[in-house]
Amino acid sequence: MIVAIDGPAASGKGTLARRLADYLNLPHLDTGLLYRATARTLIEHGQNLSDVHAAVAAARGLSLTDFDTKELRGRDMGEAASIVAAIPEVRQALVDMQRSFAARPGGAVLDGRDIGTVICPQAEAKIYVTASPETRASRRALELKGQGEAVDYQAVLEEIRRRDARDASRALAPLRLAEDAVELDTTDLDIEAAFRTALSIVEGKR
Ligand code: C5P
């Protein structure tokens, strides 16, 4: 079974995807890391984030084992990732990697922005996780504070709004609700309640 979890920045989709994958005993791919790692390679090489040729080479050179570092998940990298993610050739270069992950025997859980719409339109379960920008910003600010970062709520909120606008307005694979996705608004839900709701959506599709 393929479970596709999409949604805007800091909606909680990553946490939900991880918990669902653990519970269902399926492999999980956080596809945001692919765009983040592409951006990191460009930055490391002193290349411009809008350099199409360099960005495609960086995307093609990725291997799924480079991931999951704290630096990749940082704020700056999220912003940089959304710039490279707007380049159609970069998205194209990352399609096969994501589809072959999804094609693992037994299935997989993938989270991102375009899993249900572009990468795995055939996914059995599609959840679109949302929350108000203010809720997402305060959750993100709390998380960053927990990691010892000095944060300004207003700056985090602006960052989230900017990233939402960029992700929703790009020409290829913009962030949007797939027709057959179930929307899960977590504004008034804690993680436990959100997980239970997500699980019941997935169980309903099995
Ligand atoms: O989900 P995360 O915040 O890690 O994603 C970072 C950026 O990568 C997003 O803002 C988005 O621009 C891009 N992204 C994407 N498609 C995906 C996953 C992430 O465009 N499937």
Image (spheres, rainbow, N blue to C red):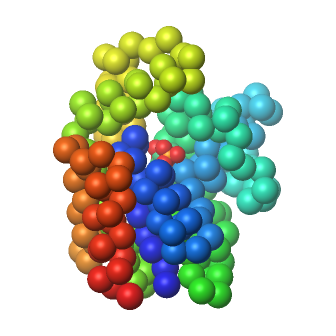
Q: Is 194 located above or below residue 92 in the figure?
A: above
> Splitting the image into 4 quarters, where does residue 4 fall?
bottom left
Q: Is 47 located above or below residue 6 in the figure?
A: above
> Splitting the image into 4 quarters, where does residue 129 fall?
bottom left
Tally the marks. 0
Q: Is residue 174 visible?
A: no
Q: Is residue 195 left or right of residue 197?
A: right
Residue at left offset 41%, top offset 64% = 5
Residue at left offset 61%, top offset 43% = 36
Q: Is 63 located above or below residue 137 in the figure?
A: below
Q: Is 198 located above or below residue 159 in the figure?
A: below
Residue at left offset 29%, top offset 55% = 193
Q: Is residue 27 left or right of residue 126?
A: right
Report the front residue among 54 and 39: 39
Report the front residue among 185 and 87: 185
Q: Quadrant of the C terminus?
A: bottom left
Report the front residue among 90 and 177: 177
Q: Is residue 93 visible?
A: yes
In percent of width and height, residue 202 lies at 36, 76
In percent of width and height, residue 67 lies at 72, 49
In percent of width and height, residue 9 lies at 40, 43
In percent of width and height, residue 144 lies at 49, 24
